[in-house]
Amino acid sequence: MHTLLEVEGLTAGYGDHQVLNGLSFTMGEDENIGLFGPNGHGKTTLFETISGLIKPASGKVSFDGRDITGRSPRDIVEIGLIHVSQGNRLFSDMMVGEVLALGAYPRRARARMRQNLDMVEALFPRLAERRRQKCGTLSGGERQMLNLAVGLMACPRLLILDEPTLGLSPRLKDELAAAIARIAEGGMPLLVVEQDIDFLLRLTSRLYLVNHGVVARTIEVGSDSFGHADVMKEYFGMTGH
Amino acid sequence: MADIIVSILVSGLVLGSLYALMASGLSMVWTTLGIFNFAHGVSMTVGAYVAYEIAQRLGPDLWVGYSILLALVVMAAVGAAFEYLLIRPFYGRDDMVLVTIMTTLAGLTFLENGVLTIWGPRLKQLEPLIPGNISYGLVNISRQELIIVLVAPVILLALFLVLNHTQIGRAIRAVGQNQKSAQLIGIPVTRMFLVSFGLAAALAGLAGMLLAGVRLMTPTMGADPLMKALIVVIFGGLGSIGGSIGAAYVIGFLEAILIFTVGIYWTPSMLFLLMVLVLLFRPQGLFGAKNPSSL
């Protein structure tokens, strides 16, 4: 299988505080990958390093065979690697319609702005209703829909989602999960961080457990060796499931 | 009495137009970068002198409008260079706001003395775009002032349309509201800073070039308009470019009325008093935009 994203021995952090300690994993073109693990062990840092917000201290990130280590966020967006960050508040004083239009800022997305807008408004009809409403007035669920929609406006070749259903009510969570499943069915490769293991098990073909800034374990979804119950027992035993 | 009211109205409109050109740029830089540019007033001065120099070189046969157009391009470059040299090195520092107060003040001193060194202290004037006066009933106004009153709203409307209905305009506003989100969309953040500095300098320069057609220019001609623009920006609400433009006209009319009633010496003090009162009772400004705390 053709490799879409390859991360090799990545170390990165904030100032003197190193969070990633030589993290490696690969992702093929036709698969969705899930990342999970305890908070504060590097999942968000990993995404921010992949998307260029943080410069890695060492290691390598390749996308579609190209070395993108240390490139600017703008370059990485232009290549088609789109990071939908956790709890992104977007632009509170701008209208939903404006933010969607801005999502088509990358050069490669401009020509397809119209089609993409129709596509995201079909996916999230609520955003179409709120086109003239300011972002700052959206509910948490609507804002999260807008985040995903903005990512899709950029014509992604790989969408990386950082806890897309964090903090949402169960009903909204289901709605978002369904939308993400539809995005995946459309053939979009997804790399997803989530705490909701059920969601990851349905969506992805492989899970990586991130612990202490490295991939501590690889789990093939569907193989009998490691199922839901094991994951729960080992890492989420105390969350009340 | 009617003639007095008319002349106050005319003078208020002219002042309001100039302040609107000044304050919109100051406000735009504030909303995008979160810094106050003390050298914004001197952009006005430099603009006037650059247009004067270009007009001198092109000769008196050529219409001054061409010199102004050329000077606007030069001013956009000056603004961009200013950002590149004096602001960019300090992005990402915790004390950036403080440091840029010092660097923009340094830029102000440098440019003001540069103007003095290059062009000397002698008073100069730029040709008006169209010479002569217009009298219509009680209204007596120079054609240049009429141009100022007409051109400023057109330019500001254009600015409004660019900021609200083009990708680059939306990108400039987005960068002011959330840099990280802007980066993740692929907006080149520092380039937007460069563009807004260039645009602001061109707007201030235009105010100077237009003013130099009705008043004599001096190396310190930008100091007073900077103060007024500061009052305007606070009056209109920090972070709201539209509010600044509205407030510019309010302050212009107030100044015209104050000059007539309390005289030219007390007018600045009264305006500052007003600013303090606004800060006390309506800190979000008259037109009520919220503070850009997201910066």
Image (spheres, rainbow, N blue to C red):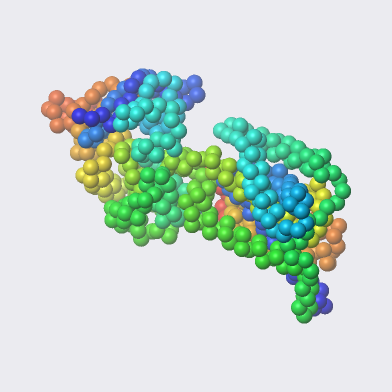
Is residue A86 visible in the rendered image? The answer is no
Q: Quadrant of residue B21?
A: bottom right
Please tell me which residue is depicted at 58% across the width and 57% down the height of the picture. B159
Horizontal arrangement in the rendering, residue A39 relative to residue B183 (left or right): left
- Which residue is nearer to you in this view: A12 or B211? B211
Horizontal arrangement in the rendering, residue B112 relative to residue A240 (left or right): right
Q: Quadrant of residue A192?
A: top left
On the image, the x and y values in percent for residue B51 come to 73, 51
- Which residue is nearer to you in this view: B137 or B124? B124
Please tell me which residue is depicted at 83% across the width and 67% down the height of the picture. B260
Q: Quadrant of residue B35?
A: top right
Please tell me which residue is depicted at 86% across the width and 57% down the height of the picture. B265
Above or below for B286 versus A29:
below
Q: Indicate the quadrant containing the N terminus of chain A: top left, top right, bottom left or bottom right.
A: top left
Q: Indicate the quadrant containing the C terminus of chain A: top left, top right, bottom left or bottom right.
A: top left
On the image, the x and y values in percent for residue A150 come to 37, 47
On the image, the x and y values in percent for residue B120 come to 85, 44
On the image, the x and y values in percent for residue A103 come to 40, 48
Is residue B161 visible in the rendered image? The answer is yes
Please tell me which residue is depicted at 47% across the width and 51% down the height of the picture. B167
